[in-house]
Image: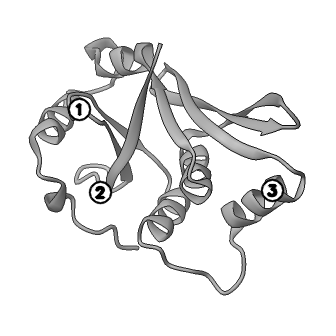
């Protein structure tokens, strides 16, 4: 079973200095931090902040290509968490058929924002990512506990 989540915000991990996308379910009970690359975080941030580029960036190009081929991104699903790595699929619909495409969660989320597609996370991913055996340190647990109580305004704006 999967849980629908939304991007709550972006922040920088104070330890690794890497961007983190914060996903939260509608009830606010489940929070999922996903560490992403700088370029992917920038693609997500520009969409969250509604910054338009004079020319299509990579995720815009992919969205335009999908649309020109007569398909839509119905949803993305974060499907697995193995060896500290998240996995995702994009679910495209075209002519009544659903096509699943393997994707990195960061790219899938950047596209979901551009296509107004829903983001889902498998419950098993939430469970695995919060279990102590899956992470190299206690930092993700501390971060998760803080994120469950943080005011969204405290997340601030992501800056490159």
Examine the rendered structure and indicate whether residue 98 appears above or below residue 70.
Answer: above
Residue 141 has which mark?
none
Tell me the mark number nearer the camera, choosing from 2 and 1: 1
Picture coordinates of residue 22 (x, y %)? Answer: 33, 45
Secondary element under disc 3, as helix, strand or loop, is helix
Picture coordinates of residue 40 (x, y %)? Answer: 54, 57
Tell me the mark number nearer the camera, choosing from 2 and 3: 3
In space, the residues marked 2 and 1 are separated at their CA atoms by 21 Å
Q: Nearer the viewer, residue 38 or 50?
A: 50
Secondary element under disc 1, as helix, strand or loop, is loop
Q: Answer few, some or many: residues within 10 Å of disc 1's Cα (few below 14, many 20 plus, some between 14 and 19).
A: few
Picture coordinates of residue 144 (x, y %)? Answer: 21, 34
State the image quarter where residue 53 is shown.
bottom right
Mark closer to the chain start, 2 or 3: 2
Picture coordinates of residue 152 (x, y %)? Answer: 18, 54
Number of numbered labels in the structure image: 3
Q: Answer few, some or many: residues within 10 Å of disc 3's Cα (few below 14, many 20 plus, some between 14 and 19).
A: some
State the image quarter where residue 146 is shown.
top left
Mark 1 in CB contact with mark 3 (< 8 angstroms): no
Q: Answer few, some or many: residues within 10 Å of disc 2's Cα (few below 14, many 20 plus, some between 14 and 19).
A: many
Examine the rendered structure and indicate whether residue 157 appears above or below residue 148.
Answer: below
With 47 as the anchor, is 35 left or right in this view?
A: left
Name the residue tied to disc 3: 67
Q: Residue at x 32, y 25 (%)?
A: 136
Name the residue tied to disc 1: 27
Residue 11 has which mark?
2
Examine the rendered structure and indicate whether residue 126 appears above or below residue 94.
Answer: above
With 6 as the anchor, is 52 left or right in this view?
A: right
Secondary element under disc 2, as helix, strand or loop, is strand
């Amino acid at each position: 079973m999967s849980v629908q989540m939304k991007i709550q915000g972006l922040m920088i991990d104070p330890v690794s200095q890497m961007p983190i996308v914060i996903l939260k379910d509608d009830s606010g009970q489940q929070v999922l931090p996903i560490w992403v690359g700088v370029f992917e975080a920038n693609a997500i941030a520009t969409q969250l902040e509604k910054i338009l580029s004079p020319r299509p960036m990579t995720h815009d190009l992919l969205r335009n290509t999908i649309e020109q081929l007569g398909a839509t991104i119905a949803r993305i699903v974060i499907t697995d968490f193995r060896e500290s790595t998240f996995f995702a699929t994009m679910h495209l619909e075209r002519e009544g058929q659903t096509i699943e495409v393997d994707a990195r969660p960061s790219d899938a989320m950047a596209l979901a924002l551009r296509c107004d597609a829903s983001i889902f996370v498998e419950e098993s991913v939430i469970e695995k990512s919060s279990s102590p055996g899956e992470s190299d340190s206690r930092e993700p647990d501390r971060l998760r506990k803080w994120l469950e109580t943080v005011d969204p305004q405290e997340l601030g704006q992501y800056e490159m």
